[in-house]
Amino acid sequence: MADGMDELVVDLRGYDLATLDAFWDAVAEPCGLPAWFGRNLDAWWDAVESRGISPVIDAHDVVVVRADAAGLFAPGNPDGERLARVFTEAGRARLELG
């Protein structure tokens, strides 16, 4: 936890995250995403930044996703780059690649 912020840490290191669908599958349960969650970047922005989608996310100041720099997050993967950009632009979410 940094600067007294309450963080929801979702550790996906070791997961086979080859696609955005795999990412949505992996974060759905730990983030408490409802069945009607849109599974797209706009819906993720709304969940982590605008709030009101998931009580689990809403109960924390920041959502931290830790993932491997491979598959979806490998350099040059356009889907991963777009998702990473959402994290970069969000004030309430952070992506940590290792």
Image (tube, grey):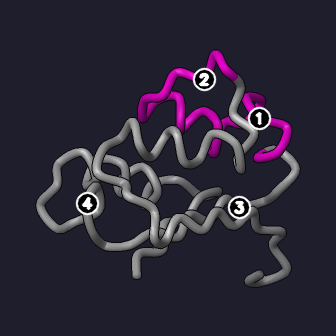
Secondary structure under badge 2?
A: loop
Distance from the alpha carbon under mark 1 to that under mark 2: 9 Å
Q: Earlier in the sequence, mark 3 or mark 4?
A: 3
Q: Which range of residues does the magenta coloring cover? A: 35-57
Which residue of the protein is positioned furthest toward the left in this rendering? 76
With respect to residue 6, does 51 lie above or below?
A: above
Look at the numbered discs 1 and 4 and tell me whether their residues touch, using CB distance below 8 Å.
no
Q: Residue at x 43, y 29 (%)?
A: 40
Q: Residue at x 25, y 60 (%)?
A: 71
Quarter of the image with the C terminus is bottom left
In the rendered image, which residue does mark 3 sit on? 62
Distance from the alpha carbon under mark 3 to that under mark 4: 24 Å
On the rendered structure, is 60 left or right of 73? right
On the rendered structure, is 39 left or right of 82? right
In the rendered image, which residue does mark 2 sit on? 37
Secondary structure under badge 3?
A: strand
Instruction: Tell me the number on the disc at residue 34.
Output: none
Q: Earlier in the sequence, mark 1 or mark 3?
A: 1
Look at the numbered discs 1 and 2 and tell me whether their residues touch, using CB distance below 8 Å.
yes
Residue type at the position of mark 4:
Gly
Q: Residues within 10 Å of mark 4 (few under 14, many from 20)?
A: some
